Amino acid sequence: MNEDSNTDERPAAIEREVPLAPNAHDLVPARSAAGVPALPSTIQQRRRRMWLQVALALAVLAAGAGGGRYWWQQLHPLVPPSIVFGNGRLEADEINIDTKYAARIGEMLADEGDLVKAGQVVARMDTRDLQASLKKSEASVRQATRAIDEAKANVTQQQAQVLLAKQEFDRATYLVQRGFQTKEALDQRVQQLNGANAALDAANARVIEFEHALEAATHDVELYNVQINDDTLVAPRNGRIQYRIANLGEVLPAGGHVFGMLDTSYVYMDIYLPTLQAGKVRYGADARIVVDAYPKAAIPAKVIYIATQAQFTPKTVETATERDKLMFRVRVRIDADWLRGRSDAVSSGLPGVGYILADPAAQWPASLQANAAPSPSGQ
């Protein structure tokens, strides 16, 4: 009986020593048949969401890689080994329209973005002081002209005096030889003749002096006209005004910048080629330029410059391999005849790719045949 009572009382004591968990989060997760604890539903949802995000990211990367490959193939079509290429940007020669003399800007006849032609007036400087000096020089020219006329009249008068003195000398010589006049009278006639000749020489010298004064005054007139014309600023080439550096009324020194323009008849692209490719390129080689804005338009060009020394690749230039650190700069210029009337379509700064026909015997593929003109749609 005692053993049975002890046995019956032990479970009751154990039940009292192990209290039940009052809250749900204090419960120990149950074990599955394999012995692995079962995960709460929230953890399973988080893991499922994480895997979905990873799968979505991989899909986006795959789509981006495919799109990038398609874009690269569109901009860089497959070309034969006889054609080398590199990327770059269209550039045009920059021309500064400057003052030749210190002056104030009196008139502005062009602005940024305007297309101008060679010889077109774009600005005028204040030339009132030069105009006054010009009038003074012109008056000096007139004065010197009248002085020359007066000097020439004096020469005519002196020539008459010389003629009279010579006649009197001849008469006195004749009379002295026959004893009708004294030797003293003959000496007087000789002195008169010499004086008349000296006066004639002086009159001729005065004519030469006034002619030199007229020449100097004429040169002054020409100088002031040149200065006035130089203060009329004109466009040296056909192009587009890119910058207006000075404003109306500003006083500029000699050589002061007024406008900066781009020569739209000289548009080129600098590309960078590794040694193996640059060694195949020759001056005057046929080239094509395809800008990103018009990927289906191949612009005809020629190679006009090949660097004699390699240089580090600029940061804005993409290369086929990271090893190509030293490259040769090659410049291809767009055909000037092709550019006529197309300056709006081909503007400076457009990125693109320059292709060079390294083998003269090779032919351009159909995608790089020269086009008439790029259109806004790139056709």
Image (cartoon, rainbow, N blue to C red):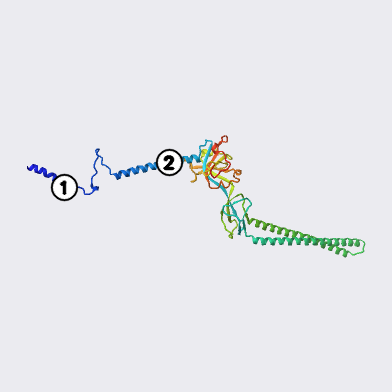
> Residue 160 has which mark?
none
Q: Which residue is mark 2?
A: 63
Compute the Cα span from label 2 to label 1.
63 Å
The answer, for residue 198, to whether it is visible in the render is no
Viewer-side residue, 204 vs 343: 343
Q: Which quadrant would residue 144 be assigned to in this image?
A: bottom right
Viewer-side residue, 200 vs 70: 70
- Judged left or right of residue 246, residue 138 is right
Mark 2: secondary structure: helix
Please state, as top left, top right, bottom left or bottom right, where the C terminus lies in the image: top right
Looking at the picture, does residue 365 appear above or below residue 115?
above
For badge 1, the amino acid type reads: Glu
Horizontal and vertical percent position of residue 286: 57, 39
Viewer-side residue, 44 vs 86: 44
Horizontal and vertical percent position of residue 17: 16, 47
Tag count in the figure?
Answer: 2
Task: Say few, some or many: other residues with alpha carbon within 10 Å of mark 2 (under 14 / 14 to 19 / 20 or more).
Answer: few
- Judged left or right of residue 188, residue 247 is left
For badge 2, the amino acid type reads: Ala
> Which numbered disc flags the more N-terminal residue, 2 or 1?
1
Mark 1: secondary structure: helix
Task: Say few, some or many: other residues with alpha carbon within 10 Å of mark 1 (under 14 / 14 to 19 / 20 or more).
Answer: few
Q: Which residue is mark 1?
A: 17
Q: Which quadrant would residue 184 be assigned to in this image?
A: bottom right
Viewer-side residue, 41 vs 258: 41
Horizontal and vertical percent position of residue 374: 56, 43
Q: Residue furthest left?
A: 1
The answer, for residue 287, to whether it is visible in the render is yes
Please tell me which residue is depicted at 71% across the width and 58% down the height of the picture.
218
Q: Which quadrant would residue 175 be assigned to in this image?
A: bottom right
Please state, as top left, top right, bottom left or bottom right, where the N terminus lies in the image: top left
Horizontal and vertical percent position of residue 256: 58, 56
